[in-house]
Image: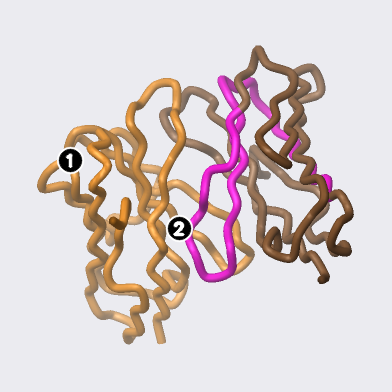
Amino acid sequence: DTAVSQTPKYLVTQMGNDKSIKCEQNLGHDTMYWYKQDSKKFLKIMFSYNNKELIINETVPNRFSPKSPDKAHLNLHINSLELGDSAVYFCASSPATGYQETQYFGPGTRLLVL
Amino acid sequence: SQQGEEDPQALSIQEGENATMNCSYKTSINNLQWYRQNSGRGLVHLILIRSNEREKHSGRLRVTLDTSKKSSSLLITASRAADTASYFCATDTGRRALTFGSGTRLQVQP
């Protein structure tokens, strides 16, 4: 009965590789997000999608490309991985935009770039 | 600098004591939310307080909001070892995304 799921949970890869992280929510929400949590635990918004449409792109390098095939899925593809991309990436969803209802988070994907 | 900043960064108390965490922010908000993150897990929503509310309760949680001082506090009463986690405040400034602080790490000693 997982509400927001992410795969993989752990990802260890070499610099320069391309990798993808998948996110799915079964809550029927319209809006999905990607956040990056750095080593100091600071959580920063990367992207927001509403009904498959990009709403927010927070000065994230072009190497990061989100894709939303339907409103229940928001995947994150990262090209040419760099050491600084090492972090925990969280997917989240919420029922509506505008007033910012409660967000529901996935368990996170721990990415380590060597 | 961050929109939401929690204080203290770390807090260690004994079981049964109360824990108070503070959050300060910079711009006007629509609402403020508190989340908990257990080690190695995702964030879990605790409570939402709207800009026209001053205080809200949920079980052992009490949240206050002072919009004139741009600050909020989260009080956990009668803490338990299971309350050990990081606590984040998040603000909705109408940008269609929440802005999180870096959290307060709470350790409750049994």
**Colour used to depict chain B in the structure image:** brown
The chain in orange: A
On the image, numbered disc 1 is attached to which residue? A71
Point out the tag, 2 or 1, that comes first from the N-terminus.
2
Which quadrant would the C terminus of chain B be assigned to in this image? bottom right
- Given residues B31 and B84, the one toward you in this image is B84
Please say whether residue B26 is one of the residues in the magenta stretch.
Answer: yes
Helix, strand or loop at label 2? It is: strand
Residue B62, above or below A76: above
Side of A37 relative to A40 (left or right) = left
What percent of the width, then of the height, locates residue B26?
69, 30
Q: On what subunit does the disc labeled 1 rest? A: A
Instruction: Choose between A59 and A25: the one closer to the eye.
Output: A25
Q: Estimate the x, y position of residue A41 in percent, counting from the top left.
A: 60, 61
User: x and y percent of residue B42 in the render?
Assistant: 48, 59
- Choose between A20 and B16: the one closer to the eye: B16
Label 2 chain ID: A
In this rendering, would A16 be left or right of B39? left
Type of amino acid under label 1: Lys
Report the residue marked by disc 2. Answer: A36
Left or right: A35 as drawn, with respect to B105:
left
Q: Which residues are magenta?
A: B19-48
